[in-house]
Amino acid sequence: MEQAAEFTWNHDKPVPGLEFAGGATSVAQNILIVDDESSLCWVLGQFFSGAGYRVDSAGALDEALNLITTGRYDLVITDLRLSGTLSEEGLMLADFVRRFAPQTRMMLLTAFATQELTDRAQSLGVDLVLPKPQPLPALAEHVSRLLGAMSLAT
């Protein structure tokens, strides 16, 4: 069994792949991270906060819905399965975000990525479906591209 590479972060050095983070604007962009794994929310929150983004996180669908209805997010990064069951709350969240805040970009991170899931997610307005785990520099590049495209469109 192959082990995942351990992530160490030196706060004094720039993170590779984040040179263009935040798109073309000087205003910090808002990211909501939704995952039932609190350690992943923490790591991604620290990573993207360190890159200049404003980051909130939620561990459950109801918490995410509350944050979306009371805040403004440029990007929502969500897991597919939030309750540890076979349900697909991430797709429910994507559908809600697309109707409530259509300008918000959506990224789905999941260990269950398939072409069929990608097609369903995109039909609900998800911009990008990525398999878990994702290397942080690669994830940063995807975030930068999504938010950069948003900056160019607005």
Image (cartoon, rainbow, N blue to C red):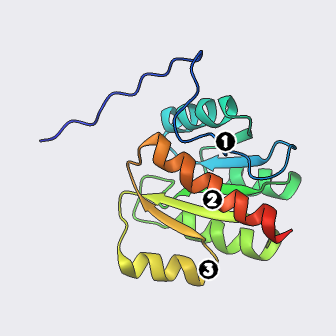
Residue 75 position within the rendered picture, expressed as x and y whole percent measured from the top left: 70, 56
In which quarter of the view is residue 5 placed? Answer: top left
**Seen in the image, is 5 located left or right of residue 123?**
left
Task: Identify the residue at horizontal 39%, vertical 52% (top origin).
Answer: 132
**Residue type for callout 3:** Leu
Give the quarter of the figure containing the N terminus.
top left
Q: Which residue is mark 3?
A: 124
Residue 150 versus residue 108: which sits nearer the camera? 150
Q: Amino acid at mark 2?
A: Arg
Give the x, y percent position of residue 34: 60, 49
**Residue 59 at x, y = what percent?**
59, 44
Front residue of 67/29: it is 29
Q: Nearer the viewer, residue 88 or 138?
A: 138
Circle 2 is placed at which residue position? 145
Q: Which residue is mark 1?
A: 57
SS state under label 3: loop
1 or 2: tag closer to the N-terminus: 1
Q: Is residue 96 visible?
A: yes
- Which marked residue is nearer to the observer: mark 2 or mark 3? 2
